[in-house]
Amino acid sequence: MSIHRLIREGRQRLGLSEQQFADAVGVTRGAVQQWEKSGGTAPKRTNQPRVAELLGVSIAELVSGGSNVGQTFAVRGEVPLVSEVEAGNYTVIDNFKLTPYYDTVPVSVPVKRHTYALRVHGDSMASHSGDSFPDGSIVIVEPEMTAQAGDYVIALNTENQTTFKQLVRDGGEYFLKPLNPRYPIKPLGSARIIGVIREFTKRFR
């Protein structure tokens, strides 16, 4: 069951109109309509506890559409914006539980349990042509996706430092390639890919 169907059927089971449900949560009727529409948005992280309480389900059950919470279930909504240090230990992020200590970023890609957002620092991935990720960009990272040659990835080196580069393959070997030609291409070596970039945006404030 999708989160949209879960909310719609739960509201109807309670005998509440869209406006009554919206008033109970503290949002607009339009927000409830989006939550119930197939392909619409999911409740923001700050609204999830109240929605779950009204429906009589846990937050994990809410965002997973009532499915087994141990399963990975894709929803669209918001993900936490983490630091580079936290990105190296991405399993601390759990989108099926409320984590109010993070700023969040809206996304249009499916959100899984450990999906997170990361701010780009520096200009090694900035380019004058083609794809470009300037300083301050925010990338959406999916740790549960297997990286392929050509993907933009987050890698973790042996010193637990993260780096954002493009994964390329040459002669059977993998390399981490910056988009800015002023920076050198380096072998992947013993570094470990810990996430694939799914989406990016630019936030100024």
Image (cartoon, grey):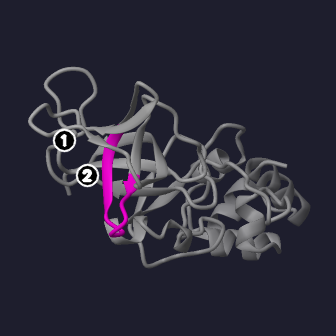
Q: Residue at x 79, y 66 (%)?
A: 69
| Residue projecting furthest to the left | 182
Q: Is residue 37 above or below residue 51?
A: above
Q: Give the class, few, some or many, for how many residues have Cα within 10 Å of label 2's Cα (few <14, many ≥20).
A: many
Question: Taking the image as drawn, is residue 83 in sight?
Answer: no
Whether residue 23 sits left or right of residue 82 in the image: it is right
Is-magenta flag for residue 63? no
Identity, as a three-letter code, of the amino acid under mark 2? Val
SS of the residue at dot 2? loop
Q: Is residue 76 above or below residue 60?
A: above
Q: Residue at x 15, y 51 (%)?
A: 122
Mark 2 and mark 1: Cα distance apart in space: 7 Å
Q: Give the class, few, some or many, for how many residues have Cα within 10 Å of label 1's Cα (few <14, many ≥20).
A: some
Q: Is residue 193 above or below residue 11?
A: above
Q: Residue at x 73, y 52 (%)?
A: 73
Identity, as a three-letter code, of the amino acid under mark 1? Pro
SS of the residue at dot 1? loop
Where in the figure is residue 60, as x and y percent of width and height? 73, 69
The stretch of residues the image draws in magenta is 155-166
Q: Which residue is mark 1?
A: 134
Where in the figure is residue 38, as x and y percent of width and height? 72, 38
Q: Which residue is mark 2?
A: 120
Whether residue 138 sits left or right of residue 87 in the image: it is left
